Image: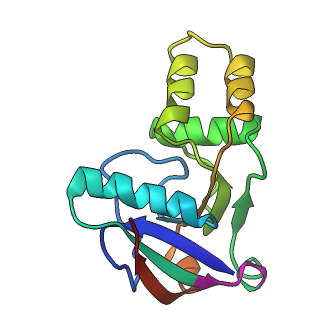
Amino acid sequence: MFVYHGSNAIIEKPEIRKSNRNLDFGEGFYATFNFEQAQSFSRIVCNRRGGVPIISVYDFDYDVAKKSLQCKVFSHPNDEWFDFVCDNRMGNYVGAKYDLIIGPVADDTVYLTFIGYLAGLTSREDALKQLKIRELYNQVTFCTEKALKYLNFNHSKEVE
């Protein structure tokens, strides 16, 4: 299967870099199974940093990878996912370490729901209800060098 990474540059050799902000699943190399989502993210990156939107495409065999990696999969936004993302976004996550994490994206619009919850303006139940009615895209986060070995650059594509 393919996974896609949207950026303003071709990324032939993915790296785990420290981000300047706290992300949903912590530090890692973020990709998605959804081409349109990667395309949208590449536009966001270009708006912030300049350049042209580029999708880097990788071959990834999850069935092989999951045999030797510590994987965490969130199939939908539930209590566990909510706590995991909140803790990571707040920089407070101290739980298990994973090589690979797959689950819904809490993009900046979804993050407003988290802010409402963390500020005490929205209950946990209402926040989860709001998240469940939105179409949440997925993300695949390669958190370790070991996980990155399962990604093989296939090609890149400049997008509009």
In-image side of 54 versus 87 (left or right): left
The magenta stretch spans residue 62: yes
Give the residue furthest to the front.
160
Q: At x 55% / y 38%, what residue is drawn?
A: 87
Q: Which residues are magenta?
A: 59-63
Give the residue furthest to the top.
121
Q: Is residue 149 above or below residue 80?
A: below
Q: At x 43% / y 83%, what residue is drawn?
A: 156
Q: At x 67% / y 60%, what residue is drawn?
A: 102
In-image side of 125 versus 2 (left or right): right
Q: Is residue 135 above or below residue 52?
A: above
The magenta stretch spans residue 26: no
Q: State the image coordinates of residue 31 (x, y, percent, origin top left).
A: 53, 66
Q: State the image coordinates of residue 30 (x, y, percent, origin top left).
A: 50, 63
Task: Name the foreground residue: 62 vs 36.
Answer: 36
Q: Is residue 2 above or below residue 103?
A: below
Quarter of the rendering occupied by the N terminus: bottom right
Give the residue furthest to the left.
50
Quarter of the rendering occupied by the C terminus: bottom left
Task: Name the foreground residue: 130 vs 150.
Answer: 130
Q: Is residue 11 above or below residue 136?
A: below
Residue 18: name its quadrant: bottom left
Q: State the image coordinates of residue 109 (x, y, percent, origin top left).
A: 50, 33
Whether residue 27 is visible, yes or no, is no
Whether residue 20 is visible, yes or no, is yes
Residue 64: name its quadrant: bottom right
Q: Tell me the colour scheme of the image.
A: rainbow
Q: State the image coordinates of residue 108 (x, y, percent, origin top left).
A: 46, 37
Task: Name the foreground residue: 24 vs 99.
Answer: 24
